Image (cartoon, grey):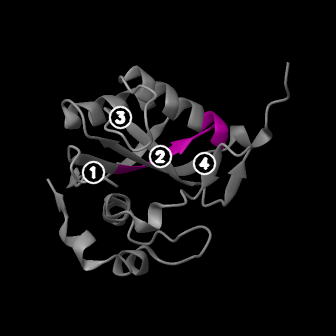
Amino acid sequence: MTKQDSSENQAKLVYLAIGSNLGNKIQNIDKAKLELKTHNVKILKCSNNFESESWPDPSKPDFINIVIKAEVYCGALKLLEICKLVEKKLGRVKSKKNSPRKCDIDIIDYNHNVLNLENKLLIPHPRMVDRNFVLLPLYQIDKSWKHPKTEKSIVNLINALPIKDLKSIKEI
C-alpha cells in the first residue's frame, strides 16, 4: 500500500482543452465532459464551442474545441490517467501524432503549477501559447488567467498570435 499524497485531499483548479475532429464532434465533446464528471472532475466553467482548422495539417477535418475550468482532488499524473481513459472510452486509438481523433484532452494548467513529471507530463502545456483553439476558449472562461511559467496574461498571449490564426477560428 502506498502513502497517499496529502495534497490529494485539497481541491486543485485545472484547465483542460478538449477537442474532436472525427464523427459527431460536439457530441464527442459532450460525452467527454460527462465521462470526466464520472471521474470526480467537477466542471466549474465551460467555453463555447470553437471551430478551427486541423493542426498541423489543415487538409484533415476541422476541429471543434472547448476549454473547461474544473476542480479535482487528484494529482496531476492521476488526472492525465483519467484524461487518457476518457479518450480511449470515446474511441481514440493510438495512431500517428496529430492524426484525426474523436477525442483529445490536454491538461493546460494544473493549479497554476509548472510541472515536469516523469517525462510524461509537462504543465503548462508546452505548445498552448501557439494555439488559437486553446487561448480563445480559455480567455472566454477566465479573462484574468496568466501563464504559470511566464506570468503573461491571456490577453498578451492572444495578441501575440498571428492575425491569420485569429481569423481562422470561429465560435459556433
- The tag earlier along the polypeptide, 4 or 1, is 4
In percent of the image, x 60 and y 48: which residue is there? 12
Q: Nearer the viewer, mark 1 or mark 2?
A: 1
- The tag earlier along the polypeptide, 3 or 4, is 4
Distance from the alpha carbon under mark 3 to that under mark 1: 13 Å
Q: Residue furthest left?
A: 172
Element assignment for label 2: strand
In this rendering, is residue 120 above or below 1?
Answer: below
> Between 27 and 14, which is closer to the camera in this rendering?
27
> Between 135 and 163, which is closer to the camera in this rendering?
163
In percent of the image, x 54 and y 69: which residue is there? 147
Q: Nearer the viewer, mark 4 or mark 1?
A: 1
In percent of the image, x 37 and y 58: which residue is there? 134
Q: Which mark is residue 39?
A: none
- The tag earlier along the polypeptide, 3 or 1, is 1
> Is residue 68 a member of the stretch shown in magenta?
yes
- The residue singled out by tag 1 in the image is 54
Magenta segment: 67-79
- The residue singled out by tag 2 in the image is 106
> Between 165 and 145, which is closer to the camera in this rendering?
165
Distance from the alpha carbon under mark 1 to that under mark 2: 16 Å
Q: Position of residue 64 (x, y in %)?
A: 24, 46
- The tag earlier along the polypeptide, 1 or 2, is 1
- The residue singled out by tag 4 in the image is 12
